[in-house]
Amino acid sequence: MRVRPLWLSIIFFTLAACGEELPEKPELFVDRESLGFGQEFGLNTYVNQEVTESLLIENRGLEPLEITEVTKSGATQFTVTLPEPLSKGEPVRLEYGKRTFVQVAFKPSSARKYEAKLLIKSNAANTPEKEILLSGVGVSP
């Protein structure tokens, strides 16, 4: 039975040595560059109906990532729900491989196209400021 953990350790370290080297500095990763509400497959969002999307934010660097600010500009029909520390004015700290989510809701007030931008500020070496485009189309029911 003692041989199995030894072999698992050897395999683990061998595989780890074969992979890419992880960046030392914090790296911001988001799961998409834009959020489009109700525009897939020709569908739109009805006026006064609210739909919600989540944006994943992850640290892919070895040093901790600190997200210091997430702001929205543009149409007021988009509302943002921040992770708890940010909603209290404190940074979100993510260790390597950890993630958090920003929720964005869209509630059109009339039948037309809406656009906004989400700006994420952090200590990331790869992108200290990341812009996410928001768009949605309201249609009459």
Image: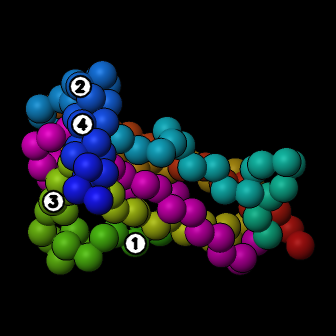
* Secondary-structure class at tag 2: helix
Q: Is residue 21 magenta?
A: no
Give me the C-alpha separation between circle 1 and circle 3.
17 Å
Q: Which residues are magenta?
A: 47-75
In this view, the mark in front (1 or 3): 3
In this view, the mark in front (3 or 4): 4
User: Quick one: quadrant of the N terminus?
Assistant: bottom left
Mark 3, residue position: 93
Mark 4, residue position: 10
Give me the C-alpha separation between circle 2 and circle 4.
11 Å
Q: Callout 1, which amino acid?
A: Thr
Q: Which mark is residue 81?
A: 1
Q: Residues within 10 Å of mark 2 (few under 14, many from 20)?
A: few
**Which picture quadrant has residue 99?**
bottom left
Cβ–Cβ under 8 Å for marks 2 and 4? no
Which residue does the image show at 66% across and 56% down from the upper left?
A: 37
Nearest to the observer: residue 45 or residue 93: 93
Q: Callout 3, which amino acid?
A: Arg
N-terminal of the pair, mark 2 or mark 4, is 4
Give me the C-alpha separation between circle 3 and circle 2.
28 Å
Nearest to the observer: residue 41 or residue 114: 41
Q: How is the image coloured?
A: rainbow
Q: Which mark is residue 17?
A: 2
Cβ–Cβ under 8 Å for marks 1 and 3? no
Which residue does the image show at 16% across and 48% down from the upper left?
A: 65
Q: Residues within 10 Å of mark 1 (few under 14, many from 20)?
A: some
19 horizontally vs 115: left or right: left
